[in-house]
C-alpha cells in the first residue's frame, strides 16, 4: 500500500468523547433497567423485599464481574467479602449505631481492605492454584464467623436491630424504614446505582482497560511496563468493597446475618448469576441475578424439591447454546432490528 | 539533553552467564549498544538467543555478569521497571490483546508510559490524548486505517506491525526486536523491511532474526552466538566472509 520514502497519508482521527458527553440517542436503552427498577417501586406492592433482594444480588454479581469478568481473577470465594460486609454492618448496628450509612461505609471499607490483603496473598498465582486459594480463604472466613460466637452469634446468626431513619442529620427527620420495605428498596436501589456508575466509569478507564488486558495476556502487559500484581490487587480490593456493600445492604434488609452469607454455595450462586447474565457487560449482572432469583422463586414454589434441577438445566442451556449469556441473546434480538448504520457511514467516508 | 558521549553505550552487557543446571546456556556474553546502533544477533537454533533476550528483559535472572542501561545496573530490577527505564522488546509470537481494537492496544501502552494507567474515575481528556498519540504511532507505520478494528480481525502482517507500534509507543532507548519477520509470508516481508527502515534513528536496536536476508539488510553490526557464547562480531561483510561462521552456522542450516 505504501511506497518507501513517501510520507504516509493517514486518515484524520478525532478521539471519541467519554462519560456522559459520549452518550447518544441510541444509548437510550441504558434507561430501561433503571426505569424498570423505579417502576417496580410503584407497582411492586408486597414484593418490595423480594425486589430488594434482587438488587442486592445484582450488586454482588456486579462486583464479581469486575474481578472475574474484567480482570480474569478466577474466584469461587467471593462470598467471603459479601459475608464480611454483612457481619460488619450487623455488628455495627448491634454495638455502635443503627445509622445504616455508618454500617454501610464501614462494611465497604473493611471488605475492601480484606480484599486487598487476601489479594496480595493469592494474586501472584494463576489458574487452579488461585481458584483453590480463593476457596481456602472463603472457608477460613466462614470458620472465623462460626467460632467467634460472642461477636457473630455463631451458627445461630446475628439479629440486626432495625436501622435508624436514613439521612436523619442536622435536625432532618430522615426517611423511616417501613415494614413493607419500600424505603429499603429505594435506599438499596440508590446504592446500587452509585456503584454502577463507578463500575461503568472504571471499566472504560485506562485502569479498567489494563485489567482487561491482563486477563487477555499478562505477558503483553508486563512487556509494556504494567505492574500486573498491584493492578490485580487494586481491582480485587475494589470488587471486594462492592461485595461488602452488598452484604451490608442485606444485613440491613433482612435484619439477620447468618453463616449462609459466607458459605461456598453463595459464592457458586453468584458465579452462576454472572455467567447466566453474561460476563464483562455490567448489565449482565442485572439480567443474570434478576433472572436467577425470579426463576428460583417460581421453581421453588412449583416444586420445592427439584428447583435446583431447573436452575442447573438453565445454566447448561445458556452455557452450551448462548454465547455471552442472556445479554448475548438480547444482543442477537436487538441485532434483528438494527443494522448498525453508523458503521456503514463511517466506512464510506 | 545532549546525546551520551560515544564512549558510553546505552546498553552494556558484561560477562553475562546463565546455567540451567549443568547446561550453560549463556556463557560470558558481552556486548555494547550505542545510541542508534543496529546490531543483528544471529546463531543456530539453541544458540541461546531467546535466553539472552529473557536475561536482558529480566524474565530470567543471570547467574553472574552485569547488564547496564544508561550507566545504571539492572541487577534485581523487575521486567516492568526495565520497560519504564527504556528497555523494550517485541515478541516472536504476537502477544497482542486480541479483543481490543488496534488503537486501544497502542493507547494502553501510551497510558502506561505516561504513568496514567492507574486512573479509574477521572481520565477523559488524558485518555483522548493517549488515543491521539496511538493514532499518530499507527500512522507512522501505515496502519492507522486499522485503528478501529479488533486485533483478531487484522491480517497477520499488520499484527506484526502493531507489535512494533506498541513497542515504539513506549519510547524505548533500547529496542529488542525478537524475530519481527516471523511467520510472515515472503510476499509480504517487505512491509517489515519498510517498518524497520522507519524506526527512529536514535534508538539502539538489537535484532534477533532467523531470516538472514533481513538481518544482512538491516544490521550495521552482527554478533554470532553459538552454544551460548559469542563466536565473533563484525560488520555484515566480515561475518559473511568468516569461515568459522560458515562452518558452524551455515553448515548446519542451509539458509543462505
Image (cartoon, coloured by chain):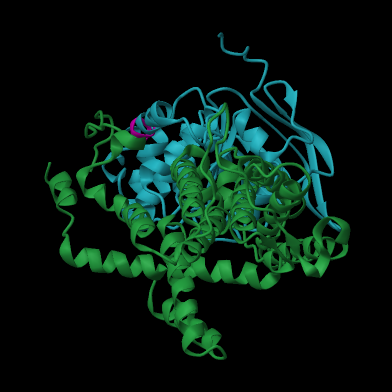
Q: In the picture, which chain is green?
A: A
Q: Position of residue B106 (x, y in %)?
A: 43, 39
Give the drawing colour for chain B. cyan
Q: Identify whether B181 is placed above or below B68.
A: below
Q: Residue at x 40, y 55 (%)?
A: B184
Give the side of residue A136 with respect to residue A339, left or right: right
Q: Nearer the viewer, residue A320 or A194?
A: A194
Q: Identify whether B112 is placed above or below A340.
A: above
Q: Nearer the viewer, residue B239 or A15?
A: A15
Q: Residue at x 56, y 67 (%)?
A: A271
Q: Position of residue B35 (x, y in %)?
A: 57, 22
Residue stretch in magenta = B134-138
Q: Nearer the viewer, residue A280 or A110?
A: A110
Query: Looking at the magenta stretch, what is its main secondary structure?
Result: helix
Q: Position of residue A260 (x, y in %)?
A: 69, 69
Quadrant containing the N terminus of chain B is top right
Residue A16 visible in the snapshot? no
Q: Residue at x 42, y 49 (%)?
A: B160
Q: Nearer the viewer, residue A88 or B53?
A: A88
Query: Looking at the rendering, which quadrant does residue B155 occupy?
Result: bottom left
Q: Position of residue A275 (x, y in %)?
A: 49, 69
Residue A46 visible in the snapshot? yes
Q: Residue at x 23, y 64 (%)?
A: A334
Verify whether residue A197 appears in magenta. Answer: no
Amino acid at each position: 500500500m505504501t511506497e518507501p520514502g513517501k510520507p504516509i497519508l493517514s486518515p484524520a482521527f478525532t478521539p471519541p468523547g467519554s462519560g456522559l458527553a459520549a452518550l447518544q440517542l441510541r444509548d437510550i436503552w441504558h434507561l430501561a433497567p433503571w426505569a424498570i427498577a423505579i417502576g417496580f417501586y410503584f407497582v411492586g406492592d408486597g414484593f418490595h423485599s423480594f425486589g430488594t433482594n434482587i438488587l442486592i444480588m445484582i450488586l454482588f454479581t456486579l462486583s464479581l464481574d469486575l474481578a472475574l469478568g474484567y480482570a480474569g481473577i478466577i474466584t469461587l470465594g467471593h462470598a467471603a467479602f459479601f459475608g464480611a460486609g454483612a457481619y460488619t454492618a450487623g455488628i455495627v448496628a448491634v454495638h455502635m449505631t443503627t445509622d445504616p450509612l455508618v454500617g454501610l461505609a464501614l462494611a465497604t471499607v473493611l471488605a475492601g481492605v480484606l480484599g486487598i490483603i487476601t489479594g496480595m496473598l493469592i494474586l501472584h498465582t494463576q489458574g487452579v492454584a488461585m481458584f483453590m486459594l480463593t476457596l481456602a480463604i472463603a472457608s477460613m472466613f466462614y470458620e472465623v464467623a462460626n467460632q467467634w460466637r460472642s461477636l457473630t452469634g455463631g451458627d445461630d446468626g446475628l439479629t440486626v436491630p432495625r436501622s435508624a431513619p436514613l439521612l436523619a442529620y442536622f435536625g432532618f427527620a430522615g426517611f423511616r424504614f417501613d415494614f413493607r420495605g419500600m424505603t429499603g428498596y429505594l435506599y438499596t436501589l440508590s446504592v446500587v446505582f452509585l456503584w454502577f456508575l463507578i463500575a461503568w466509569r472504571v471499566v472504560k478507564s485506562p485502569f479498567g482497560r489494563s485489567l482487561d488486558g491482563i486477563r487477555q495476556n499478562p505477558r503483553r502487559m508486563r512487556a509494556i511496563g504494567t505492574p500486573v500484581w498491584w493492578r490485580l490487587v487494586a481491582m480485587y480490593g475494589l470488587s471486594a468493597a462492592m461485595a461488602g456493600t452488598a452484604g451490608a445492604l442485606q444485613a440491613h434488609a433482612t435484619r439477620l446475618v447468618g453463616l449462609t452469607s459466607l458459605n461456598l454455595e453463595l459464592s457458586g450462586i453468584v458465579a452462576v448469576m454472572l455467567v447466566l447474565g453474561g460476563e464483562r457487560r455490567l448489565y449482565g449482572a442485572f439480567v443474570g441475578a434478576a433472572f436467577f432469583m425470579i426463576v428460583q422463586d417460581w421453581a421453588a414454589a412449583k416444586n420445592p424439591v427439584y428447583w435446583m434441577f431447573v436452575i442447573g438445566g438453565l445454566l447448561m442451556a445458556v452455557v452450551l447454546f448462548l454465547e455471552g449469556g442472556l445479554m448475548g441473546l438480547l444482543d442477537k434480538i436487538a441485532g434483528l432490528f438494527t443494522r448498525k448504520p453508523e458503521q456503514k457511514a463511517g466506512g464510506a467516508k | 539533553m545532549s546525546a551520551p558521549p560515544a564512549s558510553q553505550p546505552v546498553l552494556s552487557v558484561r560477562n553475562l552467564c546463565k546455567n540451567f543446571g549443568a547446561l550453560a546456556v549463556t556463557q560470558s556474553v558481552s556486548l555494547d549498544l550505542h545510541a542508534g546502533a543496529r546490531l543483528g544477533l544471529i546463531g543456530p537454533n539453541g544458540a541461546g538467543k531467546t535466553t539472552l533476550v529473557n536475561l536482558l528483559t529480566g524474565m530470567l535472572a543471570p547467574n553472574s555478569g552485569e547488564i547496564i542501561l544508561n550507566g545504571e545496573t539492572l541487577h534485581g530490577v523487575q521486567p516492568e521497571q526495565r520497560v519504564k527505564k527504556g528497555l523494550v522488546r517485541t515478541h516472536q509470537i504476537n502477544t497482542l490483546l486480541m479483543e481490543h481494537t488496534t488503537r486501544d492496544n497502542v493507547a494502553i501502552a501510551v497510558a502506561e508510559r505516561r504513568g496514567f494507567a492507574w486512573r479509574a474515575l477521572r481520565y477523559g481528556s488524558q485518555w483522548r490524548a493517549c488515543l491521539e498519540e496511538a493514532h499518530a504511532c499507527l500512522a507512522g507505520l501505515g496502519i492507522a486505517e486499522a485503528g478501529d478494528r479488533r486485533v483478531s480481525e487484522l491480517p497477520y502482517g499488520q499484527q506484526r506491525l502493531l507489535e512494533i507500534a506498541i513497542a515504539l509507543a513506549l519510547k524505548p532507548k533500547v529496542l529488542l526486536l525478537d524475530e519481527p519477520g516471523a511467520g510472515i509470508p515472503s510476499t509480504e516481508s517487505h512491509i517489515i523491511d519498510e517498518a524497520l527502515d522507519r524506526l527512529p534513528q536514535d534508538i539502539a536496536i538489537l535484532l534477533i532474526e532467523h531470516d538472514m536476508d533481513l538481518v544482512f539488510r538491516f544490521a550495521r553490526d552482527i554478533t554470532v552466538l553459538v552454544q551460548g557464547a559469542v563466536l565473533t562480531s563484525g560488520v555484515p561483510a566480515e561475518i559473511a566472509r568468516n569461515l568459522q561462521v560458515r562452518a558452524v552456522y551455515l553448515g548446519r542450516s542451509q539458509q543462505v
